[in-house]
């Protein structure tokens, strides 16, 4: 049974690594805030003091950190995972990150006989906890086949999207969908409230039809309760939108809905809502009109 | 059993009126293109030559036409339904139309002892055919209670949204949701294709999660087949978006996603796609970037 390593045991990472520990894998973990690994250590994982040390004791090393700069550091830094990896090690970055960085990591890894996959996820904290994530994978088919049984402990929809970077690109497609969808939901609830309608009653009419979506059913009611607790942090979404905008530009695509979402989420973060959930977008939209949120 | 009248037997109206005929109601119909009522006449409906004549023979008169100007003419014109209605008649406008017009019709109707409801629908041609529409109703509670058994022949989600105009406003909320949602779907599919991903494979990863929606599952595959046949006409959606923009302005709301959708759908209509389905938006977005659609 493969020895696994885990770098970054935040809300998502701790749940995901926990499923592998529960399946009987020996686990070595590193995380920037050591206390965040306490529960995994109590369940038998070994805590070490660098990503390099994780790789030295592992066959498959997972990364789940915040931003592309973090990925670069924990993978390619002086004390990074690549420095501790041996030929035959497999690196799997599950952070939502830059497709170009995924390709760069694969080149660096392959040059040392190390495998590499980019494998970002959707499904949020609940999906991670319940092992119901959607995992979008880029990289070589052989590496994908090797990692697949491990992915199956964490998720339910596991799809090989193509070569290195393709997992990241598929995740950015997901975020492009989420971005405009959230604009529609927030604008619709502002419209309903401002019109004097009862928004719950409107949701009863519209949720089941052509306007229906996961986000409307799950985040619409939170917006109406003014519950802006994070399922997914605004600051992470701002990062993802920036990555998507950069990729779109590189590909010669003019995507006005995505550009609008990037601007509005930037304004929301500037209002101090970086650590709110993405549904807080309604606050930025209400501010545009100078009114209270629904 | 109430004698019903139907004004406007296009694709939607013919199916909806047909359910009432099938339930045993005596029906009197008027439609601008007489042949569109042939099937209803073959099933026992009586064709007359004006909306006024419809109202003269009916207890409850339904209207399902194209644009607010058509509603105004068939209801309040010289040969309109109000001219033929008697005290106790109930008028039900199921066209997606202007909330202010709905209030005006109610005032005119009530002044003659005639009831009035605005009751636009979502669910499209398929929903109409299968009696699975969502019907959003504005008007007095008593009128709603009277019409409810008739609505139940046509739809499955029947909700009283409030006073006159509230049905129209709820339908515009639906369209605000649909508008930004469609932008997201078209941009996401352009992104996926341009990135060299297989869009069907990407849909397998994203459709079941937080980015999932009715429109993605139902219209995404049509976009990928370049099937732009109308479920819902672009020209009608342009009308609806104009109504929503007008209402938003009246309410002091700045809704940039809605404004973007109005602009893009206007460009799509200008490209000659007024009679295509709303999923043809991908063509306007591809044109922005000067590329082929996915």
Image: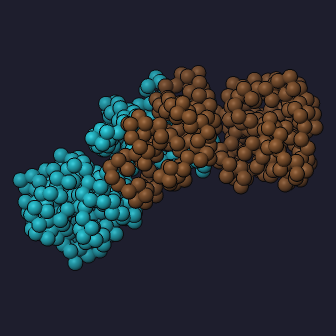
Chain colours: A brown, B cyan
Q: Position of residue A180 (x, y in %)?
A: 49, 39
| Residue depicted at 85% across the width and 54% down the height | A23
Q: Is residue A197 above or below residue A136?
A: below
Is any part of residue B49 visible from this angle?
no
| Residue depicted at 85% across the width and 28% down the height | A80
Q: Position of residue B190 (x, y in %)?
A: 53, 32
The one of B160 and B52 positioned closer to us in this rendering: B160
Q: Position of residue B145 (x, y in %)?
A: 28, 71
| Residue depicted at 87% across the width and 32% down the height | A50
Q: Position of residue A139 (x, y in %)?
A: 75, 33
Is any part of residue A252 visible from this angle?
yes
Q: Quadrant of residue A237?
A: top right
Q: Quadrant of residue B54?
A: bottom left
> Left of A164 or right of it: where is B250?
left
The one of A107 and B240 positioned closer to us in this rendering: B240
> Left of A193 or right of it: where is B14?
left
The one of B190 and A21 positioned closer to us in this rendering: A21
The number of numbered discs placed on residues in the rendered structure image is 0
Q: Quadrant of residue B17?
A: bottom left
Quadrant where the N terminus of chain B sits is bottom left
């Amino acid at each position: 049974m493969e020895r696994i390593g885990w770098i970054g045991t935040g809300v998502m990472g701790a749940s995901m690594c926990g499923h592998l520990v529960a399946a009987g894998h020996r686990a070595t973990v590193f995380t920037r805030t050591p206390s965040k690994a306490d529960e995994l250590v109590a369940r038998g994982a070994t805590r070490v003091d660098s990503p390099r040390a994780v790789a030295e004791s592992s066959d498959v090393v997972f990364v789940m950190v915040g931003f592309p700069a973090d990925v670069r550091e924990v993978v390619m830094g002086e004390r990074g995972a690549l420095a501790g990896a041996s030929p035959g090690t497999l690196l799997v970055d599950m952070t939502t990150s830059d497709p170009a960085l995924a390709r760069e990591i694969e080149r660096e890894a392959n040059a040392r006989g190390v495998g590499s996959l980019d494998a970002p996820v959707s499904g949020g904290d609940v999906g991670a906890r319940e092992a119901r994530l959607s995992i979008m994978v880029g990289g070589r088919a052989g590496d994908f086949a090797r990692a697949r049984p491990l992915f199956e402990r964490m998720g339910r929809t596991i799809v090989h999207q193509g070569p290195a970077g393709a997992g990241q690109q598929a995740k950015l497609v997901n975020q492009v969908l989420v971005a405009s969808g959230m604009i529609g939901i927030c604008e619709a609830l502002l419209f309903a409230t401002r019109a004097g309608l009862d928004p719950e009653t409107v949701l009863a009419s519209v949720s089941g039809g052509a306007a229906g979506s996961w986000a409307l059913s799950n985040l619409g009611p939170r917006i109406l309760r003014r519950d802006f607790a994070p399922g997914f942090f605004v600051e992470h979404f701002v990062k993802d939108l920036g990555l998507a905008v950069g990729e779109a530009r590189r590909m010669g695509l003019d995507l006005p809905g995505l550009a609008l979402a990037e601007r509005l989420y930037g304004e929301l973060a500037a209002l101090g809502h970086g650590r709110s959930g993405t549904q807080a977008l309604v606050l930025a939209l209400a501010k545009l009109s100078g009114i209270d949120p629904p």
